[in-house]
Image: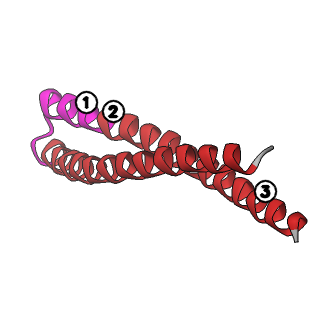
């Protein structure tokens, strides 16, 4: 692979990695808020012992679980992009070394 192509791919991967990290930060913030809301709903459910309070807690917990799955997916994307970036950097370095 030519140096120019590697550099182009590296810039693309770096850009995608930045966006994925930003998305992960947003998801982590949302997850924290949703977790707090679910904890509050759980406490209300325990104190009030009503079916409505239990349903609210169940719904809040479903949101937490869904956001947790989203976090795992984006985190996996970040790890994959980091691995791709490392591989491209290795190729770039080895292409420079072969010219010496």
In the figure, is residue 74 to the left or right of 32? right
**Residue 87 or 65: which is nearer the viewer?**
87
Examine the rendered structure and indicate whether residue 93 appears above or below residue 9.
Answer: below
Which residue is at 56% across, 46% downward? Answer: 13
Looking at the rendering, the stretch of residues picked out in magenta corresponds to 47-61
Q: Quarter of the image holding residue 65?
A: top left
- What's the mark number on residue 91? 3
Please tell me whether mark 3 or mark 1 is closer to you in this view.
3
Closer to the chain start, of discs 3 and 1, is 1
The magenta stretch spans residue 51: yes
**Mark 3 and mark 2 in contact (Cβ < 8 Å)?**
no
Q: Quadrant of the C terminus?
A: bottom right
Residues packed near mark 3 inside 10 Å, few (<14), some (14 to 19) or many (20 plus): some
Q: Which residue is mark 2?
A: 62
Residue reaching furthest bottom? 100
Q: Quadrant of the N terminus?
A: top right
**Mark 1 and mark 2 in contact (Cβ < 8 Å)?**
yes
């Amino acid at each position: 692979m030519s140096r120019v192509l590697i550099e182009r791919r590296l810039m693309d991967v770096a850009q995608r990695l930045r966006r994925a990290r930003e998305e992960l930060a947003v998801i982590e913030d949302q997850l924290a808020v949703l977790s707090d809301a679910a904890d509050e709903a759980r406490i209300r459910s325990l104190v009030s012992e009503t079916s409505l309070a239990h349903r609210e807690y169940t719904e809040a917990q479903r949101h937490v679980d869904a956001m947790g799955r989203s976090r795992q997916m984006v985190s996996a994307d970040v790890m994959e992009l980091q691995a791709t970036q490392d591989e491209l950097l290795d190729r770039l370095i080895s292409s420079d070394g072969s010219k010496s």
